[in-house]
Image (cartoon, grey):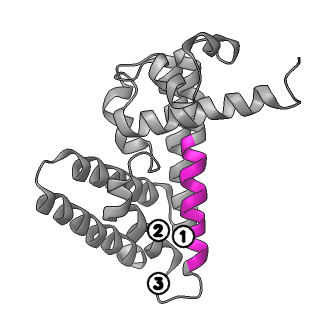
Amino acid sequence: MPYPEGHKLRVRQHILTSAAKAFRTHGVQNISLPYIMKGAGLTHGGFYSHFENKDQLVVEACQFAISDTIEILQRVADAAKDGEQTPLEAVIDFYLSPLHRDQTETGCILPAVSGEISQLSETIRQAYTRELQRLMAFITNLAGVDNSTGYALVSSMVGTVALARSVSDPKLSDELLLAGKVQAKRLIANMGD
């Protein structure tokens, strides 16, 4: 009996979702294809009917994860439009929150994989570069600043989350998030100076 229409696309989406979750939580190098396929509720054997290799999966999972992050950040920005904060301040508060730090499986992929990307294939590095540029463009446009300021803001935010996730001391982790928020907001407050 043939599969229903759209079945292959749905299965592929399950694999991408599982991969993005795994890479966000554990990075790229420590995750095997069987682990990803199990997370999608599938056997390892079906992987190659959807992807050529792990590199292709990493590329598409990064695209998927950044699209997801931008969508979430856009919702946060939209919700702040009638509030006490600017949309950018709300995005900074969300991105540098304990919730975002702790929910690695749905958080931004950049803090999770940035340290290992330079060791991966050129194909993956190029995809990572495009996705980083896409997030930087989103933040730069939201902030209404020049590229240099936007890049500094994103670098600070991603680095803060990476450090806050890395340390073993919960108090230090919280202090890093708070310091990151203060400095990111100070950066945007000084934009007109």
Residue 58 seen anywhere in this rendered image of the structure: yes
**Mark 3 neighbour class, 10 Å CA radius: few under 14, some 14 to 19, many 20 or more:** some
Say the numbered circle drawn on residue 91.
Answer: 2
Callout 1 amino acid: Val
Q: Earlier in the sequence, mark 3 or mark 1?
A: 1
Say the numbered circle drawn on residue 188.
Answer: none
Q: Residue at x 54, y 80 (%)?
A: 80
Nearer-the-camera pick, 54 or 153: 54
The C terminus lies in quadrant: bottom left
Residue 54, given in percent of the width and then of the height, sits at 52, 16
In the displayed structure image, the side of residue 44 where residue 158 appears, left or right: left
Callout 2 amino acid: Val
Q: Which residue is mark 1?
A: 76
**Mark 2 neighbour class, 10 Å CA radius: few under 14, some 14 to 19, many 20 or more:** many
Q: Residue at x 59, y 82 (%)?
A: 81
Q: Which residue is mark 3?
A: 85
Callout 3 amino acid: Gln
SS of the residue under disc 3: loop
Vertical placement of residue 104 versus 94, above or below? above
Residue 101, given in percent of the width and then of the height, sits at 33, 55
Mark 3 or 1: in front is 1
Q: Which residues are magenta?
A: 65-79
